Image (tube, helix red, strand yellow):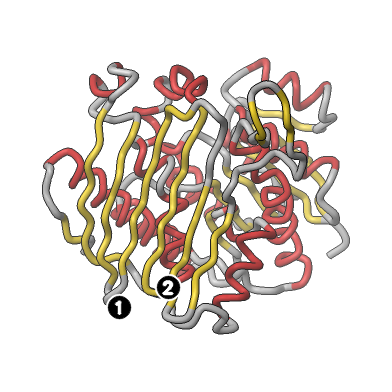
Amino acid sequence: MDKVKVGIIGLGRLGRRYAENLQFKVQHAELVAACSLNSDELDYAKNVLQVPHVYASHEDMLSRTDLDAVYIISSTDKHAEHFIAALDAGVHVFCEKPLALNVEACERVEAHSMQRPDQFAVVGFVRRFDPSYAHAKKKVDEGAIGTPFFVKSQTVDMDEQAPFQLDFVKSSGGMFHDFNVHDIDLVRWFTGSNIETVYSIGGAYRHKAFAELNDADNVLTTCALENGGMASIHASRTAFHGHDTFTEVVGTEGSLRIGRPAALNRVEISDQYGVRQECVRTFYERFEEGFLLQTQDFVDCIVEGRKPELTLRDATEATRTATAMTRSFREKNTVMCR
């Protein structure tokens, strides 16, 4: 296959980034169709990205017979619906995380995908493709820190993003699904174990409006793993220094840290404020290279006929744990994940 003809569903803040990568940076990809409910986003796709065919309906876009793959970057509450529709259209499917807001919907997508073994179907966990995280995983697999038994991981956004995030709580599933699903996947990836029980605490300490939505602006979860290991997972919407994604993996013979400090670059500034480094401000700024590598990898899998490393089971397990964490936070007790 010389070119993979791609359609995209969703052209919002992140969808636009995917579309730009597919159109201008990803080798062997040709973005031939785009779908959005927003007319301004369709104008952007047609006039700026030069996408030849734009649609206000995903059903209309999926009726095309020339598509090889579809990228789903729509709102989280629509992921499973769009995923199944794309599978039914006979194309390969990439979906932004999380797959769905409940385990039942994830398992429906899994079952649907199993009936179509020739179609690749994955959910994106971009941190696996970030070069620093990928290098850390290689070192762990090589035994550099012995057997991992504790993972500490966090996802922390700048406070200036919090009002913007209020609009997305109902469709995103809240902090555990929107933020910590990445950290959950990293715990499973580094330890090779599912999470067995969770205990989550937190609150709307700075932005009280999140409490009105049964959500929070800061949360912390203690996890017990099925293999006897441990994890501590944190999320915050209220950092003032920038986007701060950080993971530490502790093993029987050492430890490693990824993303600390959350530096914009390797420049150290000495001035009247002291000695400091500037910080990345957004998640996309931190993981821009990972997003491109992740998008390229899925296209390469299609071209090469290579099975993707990520599976829908990874996505289901992440949603299973995020759901348990949400329940624990609301019920204020320890919850079994299965």
Residue 132: give x, y in percent of width and height: 66, 59
Task: Using residue 55 as the reference point, say whether residue 103 is left or right of it.
Answer: left
Task: Using residue 93 as the reference point, say whether residue 97 is left or right of it.
Answer: left
- Asked if marks 2 and 1 touch (Cβ < 8 Å), the reply is yes
Q: Picture quarter containing residue 168?
A: top left
Residue at the spot of label 1: 227
Q: Label 2's element?
A: helix
Q: Residue at x 83, y 65 (%)?
A: 1
Between the residue at mark 2 and the residue at mark 1, the CA separation in whole angstroms equals 9 Å
Task: Using residue 269 as the reference point, say whether residue 215 is left or right of it.
Answer: left
**The label number, if any, that marks residue 128 in the structure image:** none
Residue at the spot of label 2: 191
Q: Mark 2 packing: few (<14 Cα in 10 Å), some, or many (20+)?
A: many
Q: Residue at x 20, y 41 (%)?
A: 329
Residue 126: give x, y in percent of width and height: 59, 52
Residue farthest along the right direction in this orientation = 2
Depicted 252 relative to depicted 250: above or below: below
* In-front residue for pair 230/307: 230
Q: Earlier in the sequence, mark 2 or mark 1?
A: 2
Q: Label 1's element?
A: loop
* In-front residue for pair 229/185: 229
Depicted 76 relative to depicted 301: above or below: above
Quadrant including the C terminus: bottom left
The amino acid at mark 2 is Thr
The amino acid at mark 1 is Asn
Residue 25: give x, y in percent of width and height: 84, 46
Q: How many marks?
A: 2
Q: Mark 1 packing: few (<14 Cα in 10 Å), some, or many (20+)?
A: few
